[in-house]
Image (spheres, rainbow, N blue to C red):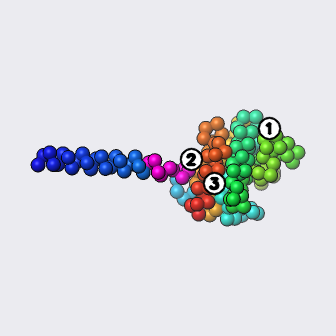
Amino acid sequence: MRIALLTAALLGALAVVLGFVLTREDDEPPFRGSVPPEGLVLPQAVADSPGVAGKALAVTFLDTQCTEACPVAASQVAEAMRLQEGDRGSVLALAYSVDPLNDTPKSIRAFLAKNRATGEIRYVDGSVAELRPIWTEFKIMASHGTGNSNMHSAPVRVFDAEGRWRSTLHPGVDLTAANLANDLRAALERT
């Protein structure tokens, strides 16, 4: 009797382990960035922007004078957009200025060109009064407030077409074009 129980227990444990291993190999997590708690959504001011409704979004925060995170973020986001192929009309990359006093139309054009992001990222500028509510809603630190172009928040947040926050990627950590392209596709699939 003991041998039968021990054998049954071992076979049961083996089945659980094999099931776990087989599931892990076949069931890759849909998002490669960190996943936020359920229920967080795109701020209404962004959701109401022209051309945003019904699209999966990559949202980031850039400063054209930044020499550290911003060039990495811009180039990776732009490449991820180029990787979208058939989904191009269903995805959009938005970059909000965190230094509106120095992010001029000329510096924005030069920054996007230098980082091969022209036509791939919609760079949103405006006055401090216009952008401060966006910074507040996203709970990011702007370089306008720090006085240092390299000291600001620069996450890339992915939202699905219904405005639900799905993942966050960080320059120098997990932000790659492949990871962002994956997360944008996964966001489209979860709508």
Residue, disc 2? 32
Neighbor class of circle 1 (other Cα within 10 Å; few <14, some 14-19, many 20+) is some
**Range of magenta residues:** 24-36
Going by the numbered disc 2, the residue's amino acid type is Arg
* Figure quadrant of residue 142: top right
Q: Residue furthest right?
A: 106
Q: Position of residue 163 (x, y in %)?
A: 63, 61
Neighbor class of circle 2 (other Cα within 10 Å; few <14, some 14-19, many 20+) is many
Q: Position of residue 185 (x, y in %)?
A: 62, 55
Q: Position of residue 101 (x, y in %)?
A: 83, 44
Mark-to-mark CA distance, 1 and 3: 27 Å
- Residue at horizontal 69 percent and vertical 50 percent from the top: 83
| Nearest to viewer (mark 1 / mark 2) | 2
The numbered mark at residue 65 is 1
Residue, disc 3? 184
In the rendered view, would you say 69 is above or below 56? above
